[in-house]
Image (cartoon, rainbow, N blue to C red):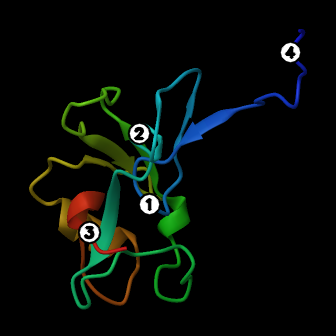
Amino acid sequence: MPHATHGSVASLWRYPVKSMLGEELTATEVTERGLLGDRAYALVDTADGKATTAKNPKKWPTLLGFRATFIEPPRPGASVPPVRITLPDGTTATSQQADLNQLFSQGAQSHGETECRRQADASN
């Protein structure tokens, strides 16, 4: 019995950090939670402990100007690798950087301070 085509994939995108621009992929693993590494990290507002979201543009006006890419591809069963983040002004940082939270708080033009956390550690 021939297989019917129901559609095609025009492009494949993964967003390593919630509410930031992501990276285009040519292939990836799909898990029960979706694309491997998708939204693995989130910026967390230190005032309320909640993940920041681009759905609140008054509080986080430049968040969608940040771009996140994995430094190395995530692997099934392995720890989530670090990410490289490009801020709207072109400054780059990694999730391992000591001054990362300060850079994000300034670069996000937020009304508070943020921390970068793995999603397992962040409130949704």
Nearer the N terminus, badge 3 or badge 4? 4
Residue type (three-letter) at the residue carrying disc 3: Ala
Estimate the x, y position of residue 109 in percent, counting from the top left. 41, 79
Q: CA distance from mark 4 to mark 1?
A: 36 Å
The residue depicted at 24 percent of the width and 83 percent of the height is 49
Nearer the N terminus, badge 3 or badge 2? 2
Comparing marks 3 and 4, which lies closer to the viewer?
A: 4
Residue type (three-letter) at the residue carrying disc 2: Thr
**Taking 10 as reference, is 3 above or below it?**
above
Residue type (three-letter) at the residue carrying disc 1: Lys
Estimate the x, y position of residue 25 in percent, counting from the top left. 56, 28
Q: Which corner quadrant of the image does residue 48 belong to?
A: bottom left
**Taking 25 as reference, is 14 above or below it?**
below
Residue type (three-letter) at the residue carrying disc 4: His
Q: Which residue is mark 2?
A: 69
Q: CA distance from mark 3 to mark 2?
A: 19 Å
> Are dots 3 and 4 in contact, CB under 8 Å?
no
Nearer the N terminus, badge 4 or badge 1? 4
Q: Which residue is mark 3?
A: 122
> Is the residue marked by circle 1 packed among few (<14), some (14-19), or many (20+) residues within 10 Å?
many
The residue depicted at 36 percent of the width and 90 percent of the height is 111
Comparing marks 3 and 2, which lies closer to the viewer?
A: 3
Nearer the N terminus, badge 1 or badge 3? 1
Nearer the N terminus, badge 2 or badge 1? 1
Estimate the x, y position of residue 40 in percent, counting from the top left. 34, 50
Q: Secondary structure at mark 2?
A: strand
> Are dots 3 and 2 in contact, CB under 8 Å?
no
Q: Which residue is mark 1?
A: 18
Q: Residue pushed farthest top?
A: 1
Q: CA distance from mark 2 to mark 1?
A: 12 Å
